[in-house]
Amino acid sequence: MENSRTVFDHVLTTQASRDAAKAGEVIAAQAERAIPLELRNQIHGDDIALGLGQSIEGKYISKFIDSAMNFLATKPTDRLVRHPYASTVYRQTLRHYLSSVESDALTPEVLEAAEATARGEATRQVRNLLYNMADERQISHMLRFVSPFFQAQVEVLEKYAHLAMEKPETMARLAQLYVGSQTMPNPFFKVVDQDGNPAKGYSPDNRVVFQNFGPLKKLFPYASSFTIPTSSLDVITQGQNPFIPSTGPLVTAPLSEFHYRERPELSNSAIYRWLYPYGQPQGSNFLERAASSVEPAWARRLTTSETENLDDAAFARRAAQIRVQMQVDWENGGRVGPEPTDEKALEATKNEYRLRAASSLLLPTPVTPQSPYQPLIDAYRQYEKKYGEAASEKFYDDFGPDALLFAGDATHSVGGMAPTVAAKTMYDRYHGLIEQAPSMVGVLTGSIGSNDPDFSQAVYDWQMRTRVSPLSSDTLRERQSPSEQMNSAYVNRGWVQYNKLQDTVTSALRTVAAQGGSSSLSASSNAVVRAWRNKQLQAIMASNPGWEAAYTSASSNLESVLQDAYHVAFDPQLDSRADITGLRSYLIARAQVSAVLDQRAAVGGSHTLTYTPDGAPTGQNADVGTVWQNYTSEMVAKNPAFAPIYNRYFEHDDLSVVIPAAR
């Protein structure tokens, strides 16, 4: 009716023309006499037809709205009341209706009438207070494919703007409700922010935490609690920003596929964060990615669970957390019973994902099981943001060695490249060099020893699908099984402890040198320091399964690393980088010392440097070994940018590997 009045007022601009219309159909001659030329508005026939609902589009829209509201009105009651607001209105209306009926007058007919009245009131309130789709606007019609929920967001703003103008105190009470519900202490649940700290006010990133107990504890033994995002409890805006309409899959899917997918360095832009607040669609091909754009959350979680999809980062991470938790509990419990396995960890993870899928389908809010070590996991994420590559060492200092086991990653960086936009930018700059020297990708991207905390999910996903080089089947980042992730956690802890050991030894040698002694670990005067270091090294190997292999494997890959290092170190475009000039100096000195060993080998001597178990040079070339150790120790001390490269690749270099490029 309102649309019809608008059309008539626009077309019939004078009282005479409107009186003629009341009398009957207005012909062209009557309109010319009744409406002067200067009062005639421009008229577009299609607009009038759309406004009156007589166009093809208008008929389809009306049919869709009628079908949707008919579906809502005929939904089973148990489904309708799952909407929090509808449930509240339904129960209040039912209670009010039945309170006026005497108990002996409660017949099936009365109950049926009460239920119908409550249903109708709940449907009407949801429609009128939240989303009245019948009042569709031209702009929402234009944007229906770009922003499917634009109309709903406009309705939210309008309804609550009217409430604010009519009753300003309503908004103040609403604000009190939002804040109070997040900060009010109670024995049943607590509200925490995204970092796991007690919430100080309302935020859509907050989580409501309920403790796990009773029968649920038996079903989900590795979850200490369950969380619900506060945004899902927000029946007004559903946690979304109503002032910025979200985009639909017809926009996000093509942009992801043809623009952003291979340009993860753009993920820091405001437009990207608006388009993909939860990341880009995932899948191994275009059809899978397109399907994931529209697939409901419960279906994704159920599919992930039943297929044990370790390519899903969240599923793989949770499986690894449970595997580490099993191992820690088993070891702390005296290793009683069978040792935990990946199969048990995966089965526990699948059960939790089944719960998440069921809650997404059947409940108004999704439920997420939470590890008892979640505070440590949240803390480590904050350390990663703050300290970057140094996060593990800082976290170890503050929380201890066992806590670091829960800081593992679901993936492994093959070449040491960090998942940051800065590293991706460097990768693009030196892409040609990286293809020639793939083992140096971490060095060239500035990731080795970097403290860049700006993790990028887009770069992380890009690494998962990008090969190290055209001739390699390995990608820059590889997925790990739960056991591999646990082993990586041990290796990570081993490297942290080893680096601390090296720092302590270096500090002790500097103290000795300041007192007039030798700064070389191989010097006989430093035998006590050397023996202590070796004892600590054995302890690190014993407490971190897998680290010894990682520690000693550097020498087995040394030939390919040296070949790649020669490709990189002498490239002129890298002259300004301190880490590369350090690498260049190391390779030049290595070639010079290797030439001395060649001369000795030519007259019947040995070309190899040998060391005693405690690291002191021995044998025919002990003098050369001592000079070499002194030189590398001094070089690492003077060039901190090169130190992490030396520790990662060249600490076990005994000069036995001969590279033709060095000649």
Image (cartoon, rainbow, N blue to C red):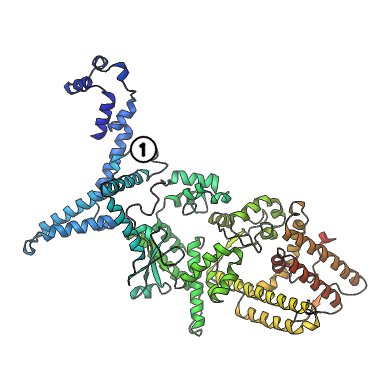
Residue 438: percent from the left, percent from the top?
69, 58
Q: Quadrant of the N terminus?
A: top left
Residue 546 in which image quadrant = bottom right
Q: Is residue 143 above or below residue 521?
A: above
Residue 270: percent from the left, percent from the top?
51, 48
Q: Is residue 567 left or right of residue 174?
A: right
Q: Is residue 426 above or below residue 359?
A: above
Is residue 495 shown in magenta? Answer: no
**Is most of the magenta stretch helix, strand or loop?**
loop
Residue 58: percent from the left, percent from the top?
31, 34
Front residue of this view, candidates 95 and 409: 95
Q: Is residue 591 left or right of residue 148?
A: right
Q: Quadrant of the C terminus?
A: bottom right
Residue 543 in which image quadrant = bottom right
Q: Is residue 541 left or right of residue 360?
A: right
Front residue of this view, candidates 207 and 159: 159
For label 1, the crowd category at 10 Å Cα-Cα, with few meaning under 14, some 14 to 19 and many 20 or more, is some
Which secondary structure, mark 1? helix
Q: Amino acid at mark 1?
A: His
Q: In the displayed image of the protein, which residue is found farthest to the left? A: 104
- Looking at the rendered structure, the number of numbered marks drawn on it comes to 1
Residue 524: percent from the left, percent from the top?
80, 83
**Residue at figure coordinates x 73%, y 63% from the top left:** 561
| Residue picked out by circle 1 | 141
Magenta region: 233-243
